[in-house]
Each structure stands twice: as C-alpha cells, then as structure tokens.
Amino acid sequence: METSKSLFKEAQRYIPGGVNSPVRACRSVGVDPPFIDRASGSKVYDADGREYIDYIGSWGPMILGHAFPPVVGAIRQAAERGTSYGAPTRMEIEMAKRIVDAFPSIDRVRMVSSGTEAVMSAIRLARGYTKKNRIIKFEGCYHGHADSLLVKAGSGVATLGIPGSPGVPEALAELTTTVPYNDLEAVRSAIDRYGEDVACVIVEPVAGNMGVVPPAPGFLEGLREITSERGVLLIFDEVITGFRLTYGGFQDIAGIRPDLTCLGKIIGGGLPVGAFGGREDIMEQLAPLGPVYQAGTLSGNPLAMAAGIATLDSLREPGVYDELEEKTAHLCTGIESILSNRKVSHRINRVGSMFTLFFTGEDVTDFASAAQSDQEAFSDHFSKMLAGGIMVAPSPFEASFVSRAHTDEDIGTTLKAFA
C-alpha cells in the first residue's frame, strides 16, 4: 500500500525536493509532508487514510469548501465541451463582467494563469505606462516568484530563510526598493531618494504572506495620497484578499481605488488562475491595443473560468460573508481563551475569514515583528495539530483560512486539539 512516506521518497527521485512548491516539503517544521489523496467539504484525506480538518484550503481558494458540488458540476460541463481552445470564449467575458462589477477601480481586466503571472504583468504594465523602472515593495509581502519580487519576500521564501534568490540578476534586484510594511515615512523617503524613476508601489492591502498583518489605520490611505501626489502607480495585490473578505476586494472595505489590482485564487475556484486589471487608460497600453506585450496560451482557460464563475455566483448569496466572519471569530476567540489560560505567549491577527497565530508576546505589525515569533513553538504546534487531525500551513508566515464548509463541530474539534 502506498503511504505518504513512500510517496515522498519516490517523489524525491523525480521532483526537486519531492515537491512542486517549496513550502509543501514541511522542512521548517521537521516532518515529511502528508500526500493528499482526496478532499471534500472542510476535510482532506491523505494517502494513509487519515482525515484532517483543513485550514489551508489550497492556500486560500477553497472558500466554499473542497469539491463544492456547483463548482465540480461546472468544471464537468466545461470539460465535456473541451479543456482548452487557445481562442476567446463567452466564459471569459462572463468572468470579466463579474470582476469589473465587483471592483470600482477596475475598468478592464485581463486573465492569466497564476497570481505570479498577474503581478509580473501588472508591474511590466506599470513600467510601460509610466516609462519608469523602479518598484517599491514591502518587506514580507510575497507577490510571486518573478525576479524583481523575490527581494525580502514573505511566504515560502521567509519560511526557508532565503533573503533573495540565486538566479536573480543584481541589476534587476537593484530596481526593487523594499521598505517596512505599515511605514509611510519609509515610502516617502524611498520616493524622495529615487526621484522620478519610481513606476509603482505594490502592496498586499492585508498582508497574508508574513502571516496575516492588517494595515495600520491610515496606511493605505497614505499610500494612495503619496503615490497620487508623485505620479506613481499604486498596485494592490489582492490575490489572497480578492473575494475572500467581501464580494470584491479589501479596497472596497477600505474605500480606496488603486490604479491596478492583481487577483487569483478564489476567482479560479481552485483551478490555476490569475488576473490583473485597472484604469482604462492604463490597461489600453496592453497589446494588441498598446505597446506593452503580455500573452498566455492558457489564459482564460475554460475550466478555470467555469469553476471561478460558479464560485463567485455562490459567494453572492446573502449572508455568506457574515457567516464566514462569525465562524472565524468563534474559532479565534476560542483559541485565544485556551492559549491565555495555558499562559502561552501568542498573538492572533485576524481579518475576516483569514488569520494567523503568532507565538510571540508582542503585537505583529510588520515582517520584523512577525519574524520574532517563536518558530520552535510553531513547529511543536504544527505537529500537535497534525496529530490531532488538523491541517494548518507548515509555516509560521502563512495565513489560515476558514471556509463556508467548516461546521460548528469542526471548530469544536479544532479547539479540543488546542486544549
């Protein structure tokens, strides 16, 4: 019988590190990764037949739960008509309509196949539109693995302790300026220092890749003011937060309109997808209308469009986000009570249905404070959760996600694992 252990051993013969995305290897928590065989609702099942309540949710997309019947049905119907055409389809229009309707800042949107591709393309567009070269990003914010964005990134880069990456030319890294999250003065200083060569500032409006870190009051408003004053484009990376916290993006909650927005995850219903969109005058610089080239053979893939449309339509049902808020608040309040009674140093950062447990006694407001979290304590916590049938991300620098499929019983079982 195949087991996770035997599969991991075999995988290492053919795949670097045995995984197709580094954090999945679970090296930072000192265990071999469970190999997932199937999933349904709030649960995943590994090759050994073990059941886990899942708070990874494929790193965010499974907001309705795994194998959600309307999504599975939509994929099946689309697949019966063909899996890829490399040509325009009606479903691309339907997805674009939904995104434009949900985001007041987006006049035009283009579909791609991953969040990394969305961000890479948005930055190229920002540089092409402004005719400037430099970008400003924030320490601990992960925007995919494109060359310019691996400087002081979060997520798996932070988990593995990699400050940048070999293979990224110094000339490209030099064009990326990194400043602390939630620090407006650092942004002003960077723009002042580099004068007229700053094309864009890119930010996760709620950081999710150093763990969940919400924006400080006035931070996003300040970014919008500074960038508007200096002729710098503002890009919101809402790959995680888009349709996670409300029907639309966090920008709707914050009342801010960025110039460009990057999306992914939920808009594909669990299939590979990404998108970027923004103001009409900027987006019309893209080929074939303008000189900024971007293309993708599988962009707007009909299976991903079908899954995404079914997901977004389900999220428009009344009360969905209130339900997610209530469930997640109940879970986090319970964790807080248990850990406080055990006198465990901790902080829980939560925004809507995404949260992170940090093992630290200090507030977590940026990457420097997130990095002070006790990683040994997190490793022990991860092993305890796994043994108790709870699946959380194998990294202290990731978010946990609650789905609509999580039940009161699931939350009760999860809290028992903490006790």
Image (cartoon, rainbow, N blue to C red):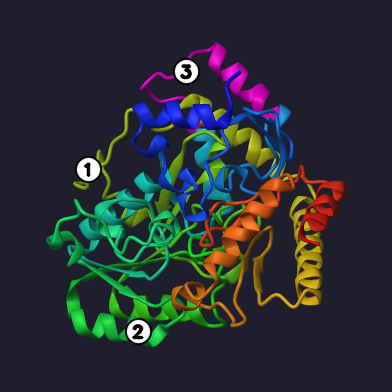
Give the residue drawn at x 20%, y 63%.
173
Mark 3 to mark 1 CA distance (whole Å): 26 Å
Region rendered in magenta = 70-92
Labels 1 & 2 near each other (Cβ < 8 A):
no
Query: Which residue corresponds to mark 1?
Result: 293
- Tell me where residue 188 sits by quadrant: bottom left
Quarter of the image containing the C terminus? bottom right
Quarter of the image containing the N terminus? top right
Query: Which residue corresponds to mark 2?
Result: 186
Label 3 SS: loop
State the residue in front, 363 or 124.
Answer: 363
Instruction: Determine the residue located farthest toward the left in the rendered image.
Output: 171
State the residue in front, 49 or 182.
Answer: 49
Residue type at mark 3 is Thr
In percent of width and height, residue 225 lies at 41, 80
Residue 355 within the magenta-colored segment of the rendering = no
Label 2 SS: helix
State the residue in front, 209 or 83.
Answer: 209
Label 1 SS: loop
Give the residue drawn at x 33%, y 60%.
162
Q: Reading the chain from its start, which is encountered first: label 3 or label 1?
A: 3
- Tell me where residue 38 sits by quadrant: top right
- Tell me where residue 314 sits by quadrant: top right
Viewer-side label of 2, 3: 2
| Left or right: 308 in relation to 142 | right
Mark 1 to mark 2 CA distance (whole Å): 32 Å
Against 252, residue 272 (above or below) is above
